[in-house]
Each structure stands twice: as structure tokens, then as C-alpha cells.
Amino acid sequence: MPTIERLRLVCNPLADAPWIGSNLKMALGREETLRLVQHVAGLDEGVMRALVISMPFLGESVAAAEGSGLRIGVQGCSTHDRGAYTGEVAARDVASMGADFVMVGHAERVALGESLESFAEQVQRAREANLNVLVCVGEEAQGDHDSDDLITQAQLIADGQFHDGDVLAYEPYWAIGEAGCEAPVDYIDARMTRVRLALGEDVTLVYGGSVNEGNCAQIASLDAASGVFVGRAAWSPAKWSGIEARVRGESQ
């Protein structure tokens, strides 16, 4: 397993632009997805934006986002490149449809039995297909502020390498989903600061987990944070705009 000393960071995000993204899970249908993609793609510059969409809507979403700064990603890929793997989708096929990145490591995939080793293989397939990755890390239960476990997850999944365009999302397992609990900002700050110190200033490090209009601005303003990874609080054009306005300091 790579050590902290072996971390090689070659990511160079836009320094002054906040990052805002949302994982749409399997919550939105085709029309709702495309409506949101079109809305976000039409917003002005000054924010790095990303949507993780459901695979059936990939092609239309890529077309709707064409020419904008909006990055479109998918919620995972196969650990295999080709073969008799019914139901799997190869990273190279995702890339051929115009996706920008693959999300790996999400807590809901862990709950379905995927492992850190499986996530690492997905990252490898994504790299081979010239796709970026959005790597999710988190802890199962609220604990102390020792974040070495998060750093170890990032090392194992991404082999210690974060390329230009990659994102590392800290998402406590206990803070996501409908039953998730909103994490105290000082808890978020302590853990993200430890990760930031280990990984350096260049990696795009964002927070997700019960992010909403009430806490997004404070979280995004943390010194260690590059932005926020939002769930259901951004799943409509109006909700997305509300989040973005607060992160940009345009609404109180």
C-alpha cells in the first residue's frame, strides 16, 4: 500500500473558483435530469460545476452540457475492460459517450458489497480510458478528528495520485442519505484540515454529507475545502441556484 510520503499530486484546480457538484443517484428520471443539466450548463462562469448522472441519460446529458464548463460523470464503471460481465459498463464505453469522469468509492456502493480494492480497479480502468475520477472517502461512524483512515482510503483507491481534473470528496457515511445527520462544521473542518495537510494545496478536496442551503456557504468557506458535493438539496434548477448563490455569497 502506498505511504503518505509516496503521494504524488499533479492536480491543478482553478484556484479561486468554488467547486459545486451533485450526485443524482437513481432519484431523477430523464426529463428531470435533462432539465437540471440544461439549467446548470447555462449558468455563468466563476464556479466549477459537476453532475454525476444515471447511466441511461449519459449521452443526452453530455449533449446538453456541450460548450459549457459543466462536467458530466457517471456513478461507477466495471473493474473489467471487456468480457462476459452481464450488467457491467466498461470505462472505455463511458468515455466514448463523452463522460468526463467516473465517481468511485461512494458509501452506497460500499453498502452493496464493493471494496476499496474494487474501487482501485475502477480507477485504473478510468485512467486507461483517459477519464478523471471523483473519489469518495468517509467513515462509518462519527468519531474523533484522526483522519489518517481517510488518507489511507484515498491512497489505496487512487494509488496516491490525483490528476488535474480529479476530485476527492470527504463524505461521512453517517451524514449522507435521507437518514443522514448533519455533521458539525468544526468536525468537518478538523478532518478536512488533516487530509489537506497530508495531500497538499493542489488537490480539489470537497465535502459532501447533508449539505444544504443552511450550511453550504460555511462549509465551502473552510480553508481546507475547495467546495461542496450536494445531494437532494440541489436536485432541481431552483435548489441548485439557491446552493450556488449562497456559496458565491450572493444570498444570505
Image: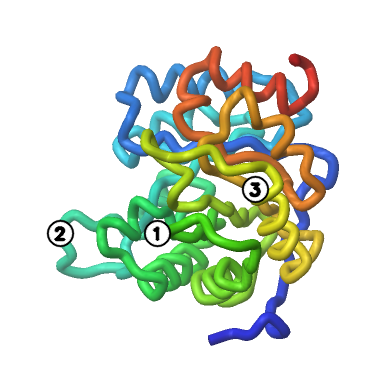
Pick whichever of labels 2 and 3 is earlier in the sequence.
Answer: 2
Q: Amino acid at mark 2?
A: Thr
The quarter of the picture where residue 9 lies is bottom right
**Gap in angstroms between the C-alphas marked 1 and 3:** 26 Å
Instruction: Give the class, few, some or many, for how many residues have Cα within 10 Å of label 1's Cα (few <14, many ≥20).
Output: many
Residue 98 visible: no
Q: Position of residue 6 (x, y in %)?
A: 69, 84
Image side of residue 116 versus residue 182, left or right: left
Instruction: Give the numbered dot on residue 206.
Output: 3
Residue at figure coordinates x 43%, y 59% from the top left: 140
Q: Position of residue 155 (x, y in %)?
A: 57, 74
> Helix, strand, or loop for circle 1?
helix
Which quadrant is the C terminus positioned in? top right
Image side of residue 97 versus residue 186, left or right: left
Image side of residue 164 versus residue 61, left or right: right
- CB atoms at circles 1 and 3 under 8 Å apart? no
Instruction: Give the numbered dot on residue 238.
Output: none
- The residue lying furthest to the front in this view is 144
* Closer to the eye: label 2 or 1: 2
Residue at figure coordinates x 64%, y 85% from the top left: 3
> Helix, strand, or loop for circle 3?
strand
Instruction: Give the class, few, some or many, for how many residues have Cα within 10 Å of label 3's Cα (few <14, many ≥20).
Output: many
In this figure, what is the number of numbered marks? Answer: 3
**Gap in angstroms between the C-alphas marked 2 and 1:** 16 Å
Pick whichever of labels 2 and 1 is earlier in the sequence.
Answer: 2
Q: Amino acid at mark 3?
A: Val
Instruction: Give the numbered dot on residue 86.
Output: 2
Image side of residue 134 versus residue 243, left or right: left
Q: Is residue 35 above or below residue 91?
A: above
Which residue position holds label 1? Answer: 92
